[in-house]
Amino acid sequence: MDYAIIAAGEGARLAAEGLAIPKPLVTLHGECLVDRLIRIFTANQAHHIYIVVNSQVPSVMQHLQALASSVNERYGCSVDIVAAHTPSSMHSLHFLTEHTECGQRPFCLTTVDTVFREDSFACYIDSAAQRITAGTSHAVMGVTTWIDDERPLYVEMDAQQRVIAFSDSSRQCTTISAGVYTLSPETIPVLQKCIAKGEQRMRNFQRALLQQGLMVHGADMGKAIDVDHRHDLILAEAFVSE
């Protein structure tokens, strides 16, 4: 399985609260957020990891360049890092697919600030890989019932876990996106159409997958936390310690 990390945000909310460290380098129990993801991915059969970083924050690129060679030597996993200044996560993903081989094979994507249990992720990626490999799904979205997001994306599913709608409001739905996506190459043309139309948000790409008739499923990730604020970091550290 290939993996991709979107680490190109500015971390403006954390900076406004006095945490001036670039978000990918924020630590949980002494481990950088981006390092933690790389470690988890290599533990789950990562063949290639693609990372897009903010071109205006050179310290993140320098950190990852120093890390990449050791990851390759220790795990036999290649790490490609590209720098961009993009307006959204969806544009960062598009930049990755345009400037690397990301998307030519099935891959799992996450933003750098998503914190989840390692064992829950292993179950998720195993389920997602099976669906993608079998051709029964074009995309498998990690979902959670832990709702602690400022603007959650609600994911409505049928009894077979097939996604039937992505909604900005709950409509009595208790499941939201966990910010983890496993995508097949068939999803990339849909992404390109969204960019061409001027779409700005990742959730509109997810909606477009359904509109284009692609098979999208959800898979439970357990509890997942987005580190957007200082209090999120406190919650995430306690969560990781449990």
Image (cartoon, grey):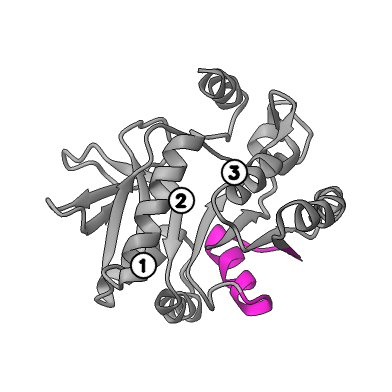
The answer to whether 224 appears left or right of 80 in the picture is left
The answer to whether 41 appears left or right of 142 in the picture is right
Q: Which residue is mark 2?
A: 180
Judging from the image, what secondary structure is the residue with disc 3 in?
helix
Picture quarter containing residue 13? top right
Amino acid residing under circle 3: Ile
In this view of the protein, which residue sits in the foreground, 240 or 199? 240
User: What percent of the width, then of the height, locates residue 242?
Assistant: 50, 17
Callouts 2 and 3 close, C-beta under 8 Å = no
Q: Which residue is mark 1?
A: 132
Amino acid residing under circle 2: Val
29 drawn magenta: no
| Distance from the alpha carbon under mark 1 to that under mark 2 | 15 Å
Residue range highlighted in magenta: 79-101
Q: Which residue is mark 3?
A: 40
x 50%, y 76%: residue: 195
User: What percent of the width, then of the height, locates residue 189?
Assistant: 44, 82
